[in-house]
Amino acid sequence: MTKFPELVFSGVQPTGNLHLGNYLGAIVKFVELQNSHQCIFCVVDLHAITVAQNPNELKSNIREVTAAFIAAGIDPEKHIVFNQSQVPEHAELAWVFNCVARIGWLNRMTQFKEKAGKDRENASVGLYAYPTLMAADILVYRATHVPVGEDQKQHLELARDIAQKFNTDFSQSIADSGFGEAYFPMPIPLIQGPATRVMSLRDGSKKMSKSDTSDYSRINLTDDPETIAQKVRKAKTDSDALPSEIEGLIKRPEAENLVSIFASLNNQSKADVLSDFGGKNFSSFKAALVDLAVLKLGPIGLEMARLKKDEAYIDQVLSKGSHRAREIASQTMKDVKSILGFIQ
């Protein structure tokens, strides 16, 4: 079996208004992973245009995500931070994968059905083919591990299917080219922590989202400490005290969400949090959560605000990162073209 060096690929869409769900579900995991793995952090702006974008807002959002990466603790000198559109090999490999993936595979993608809604005939081809580009994002670096949320697991499974089919379809050419039994690795999902899916502060049954009409449904990474505190205090709860055991959170979505958020921010398990706060009312728990959220998130918002004002620095980070990314991606495409039989 071919042995691949461990490499983590992570991507975040520049959709604006990054919030606590983005931080706990993705960015904080990225910061942890950089201490144990070689990492590539990508602002996936090609994915963003699968739906209509305002060009000026998109440019601002790309910089905002980059600022969030750095403010949260990602080191762009030790690891690669870049935006996807500056590395054309992503789109080039995506076309190859469009020819490897099967229509039946894409038809099973539930996220397309959810995003396209009832008017699927008017959805863009890009939105439909989004998963093959995601596979290319990962495999153009031959990444072995990908931190994903629950809603992206199906796309990563498709990436694995594409890698396997490519390796199988071109097995002889791969061997003849000196790459061993397989050219692409089978990327492994990394789903970690107690709050991989952060829910709305106003409705514990709905995922935290920037599209929610109520700003009190989410904590934005750009919120100042006073706003963070106010939103936590106003978060929806129920009338019962916190339970002492995890089983007591069943059918209490708002309580479970706040406990999960506390656990993730404090690097604890939900059981540990309930051990400390079980039997107490929400007013005392929220007071502790306010202090913790302001401590953890306040500095990130302030640093993001500072970085966003320095556009030249952000653009320099992205430019340097894209050059480093291309060194890897261009070699992959050279290999792929050789395997496919293209003349170079």
Image: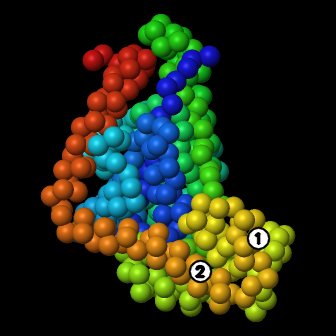
Question: For the C terminus, which image quadrant?
Answer: top left
Dot 2 corresponds to which residue?
Answer: 288
Label of residue 48 in the image = none
Given the image, on which type of amino acid does mark 1 rest?
Ser
Dot 1 corresponds to which residue?
Answer: 275
Given the image, on which type of amino acid does mark 2 rest?
Ala
**Residue 336 on image: x %, y %:** 40, 23
**Residue 248 on image: x %, y %:** 83, 75
Among the 4 quarters of the image, the one containing residue 269: bottom right
Q: Is residue 324 left or right of residue 145?
A: left
**Label 1: few (<14), some (14–19) or many (≥20) C-alpha neighbours in 10 Å:** some
Among the 4 quarters of the image, the one containing residue 282: bottom right
Residue displayed at 19% across by 69% down: 309
Q: Nearer the viewer, residue 71 or 143?
A: 71
Residue displayed at 35% across by 61% down: 71
**Residue 22 on image: x %, y %:** 49, 64
- Placement of 245 over or under 236, stated as above or below: above
**Residue 335 on image: x %, y %:** 38, 20
Q: Nearer the viewer, residue 154 or 96?
A: 154
**Label 2: few (<14), some (14–19) or many (≥20) C-alpha neighbours in 10 Å:** few
> Disc 1 and disc 2: Cα gap in Å?
14 Å
Which callout, 1 or 2, points at the residue further toward the start of the chain?
A: 1
Disc 2, SS: helix
Residue displayed at 61% across by 35% down: 161
**Residue 140 visible to the viewer:** yes
